[in-house]
């Protein structure tokens, strides 16, 4: 892809899946995911994930609270920039924020999409106007049929939101929400017992990292941050 000479780029994240930068080109500000810098062993997977994200964003076109797809050329994905602070630094404590976030998950569901990566705080933003936004649709589930599997994934999205609420706004948890928090799906239980261990092992041993967001959380780590989806 051509870089226009007027572009200024700020690197936000770089890992074995490539790098993410914020680009200013004239008036436009957007986020670029570039898979060409991915580890060669993972480049195919990185491109698959970026293509999948492009499909997810296509499905969400026009929805408020998610990035808008600008461009996908098979290697580089561009999406609109959303001004705000990631959850781990904004630490949303207003119950209203969680109601809005819940509505956003329902809006994704209406479009046939489960996010699947909402346990990670950097994938949540508190926008400058105080409302929530979600990023990073690389492993979302895009459904044709809204069957039991899809409904379970949406419930998991909600459970991850409630975990964040338990961290930042526990006094506002309702009895129903507390019950939902305890009800982990068989998928989450299996992931925690097996898949997560394998993933951590590979990430640590082979690629030298295990983190929620390339170290973005390391300045304020909670015990439960040592996790993928739980
Ligand atoms: N559209 C966006 N608006 C604002 N910040 C973004 C946007 N997309 C990504 N970011 C920032 O870049 C980080 C990494 O992007 P993300 O899509 O989550 O990549 P990864 O899959 O590597 O986690 C995010 O946690 C966020 O801080
Ligand atoms: Mg992310």
Image (cartoon, rainbow, N blue to C red):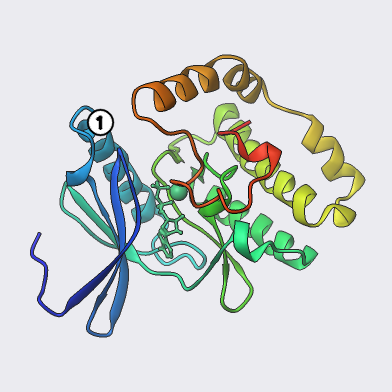
Residue 41 left/right relative to 151: left
Quadrant in the picture for residue 8: bottom left
State the residue position of label 1: 42
Q: Position of residue 210 (x, y in %)?
A: 47, 33
Q: Position of residue 147 (x, y in %)?
A: 56, 30
The C terminus - image quarter: top right
Task: Pick out the residue farthest to the top.
Answer: 194
Classify the position of the N terminus by image quarter.
Answer: bottom left
SS for dot 1: loop
Instruction: Please give the name of the residue rendered at 45% of the width and 41% of the height, measured from the top-left corner.
Output: 140
In percent of the image, x 42 and y 34: which residue is there?
209
Which of the pair 144/128 is nearer the observer? 128
Q: Quadrant of residue 148?
A: top right
Disc 1 residue: CB within 8 Å of ligand 1: no
Left or right: 148 in relation to 16 = right
Q: Decide: is 98 above or below 114.
A: below
User: Residue at the bottom extreme?
Assistant: 27
The reply, left or right, for residue 12 in relation to residue 213 is left
User: How many marks are shown on the rendered structure?
Assistant: 1
Residue 111 in percent (x, y) is at 49, 51
Residue drawn at (85%, 41%), measured in percent from left and top?
178
Residue 154, above or below 10: above
Q: Nearer the viewer, residue 198 or 58?
A: 198
Residue 172 x %, y %: 87, 57
Q: Nearer the viewer, residue 88 or 159?
A: 88
When asked about the image quadrant of residue 61, the answer is: bottom left
Mark 1 crowdedness (10 Å alpha carbons): few <14, some 14-19, many ≥20: some
Q: Quadrant of ligand 1?
A: bottom left
């Amino acid at each position: 892809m051509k870089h226009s000479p007027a572009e200024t780029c700020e690197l936000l994240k770089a890992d074995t899946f490539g790098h993410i930068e914020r680009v200013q080109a004239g008036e436009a500000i957007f986020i670029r995911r570039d898979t060409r810098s991915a580890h060669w062993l993972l480049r195919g997977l990185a491109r698959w994930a970026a293509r999948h994200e492009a499909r997810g964003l296509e499905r969400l076109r026009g929805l408020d609270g998610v990035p808008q797809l600008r461009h996908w050329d098979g290697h580089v994905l561009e999406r609109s920039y959303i001004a705000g602070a990631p959850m781990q630094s904004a630490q949303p404590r207003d119950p209203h924020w969680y109601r809005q976030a819940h509505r956003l998950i329902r809006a994704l569901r209406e479009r046939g999409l489960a996010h699947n990566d909402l346990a990670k705080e950097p994938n949540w933003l508190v926008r400058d106007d105080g409302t929530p936004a979600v990023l990073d649709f690389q492993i979302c589930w895009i459904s044709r049929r809204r069957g039991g599997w899809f409904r379970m994934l949406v419930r998991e999205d909600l459970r991850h939101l409630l975990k964040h609420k338990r961290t930042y706004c526990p006094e506002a948890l309702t009895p129903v929400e507390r019950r939902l928090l305890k009800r982990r799906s068989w998928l989450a239980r299996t992931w925690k017992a097996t898949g997560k261990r394998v993933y951590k092992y590979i990430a640590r041993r082979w690629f030298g990292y295990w983190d929620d967001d390339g170290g973005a959380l390391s300045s304020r780590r909670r015990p439960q941050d040592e996790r993928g989806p739980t």
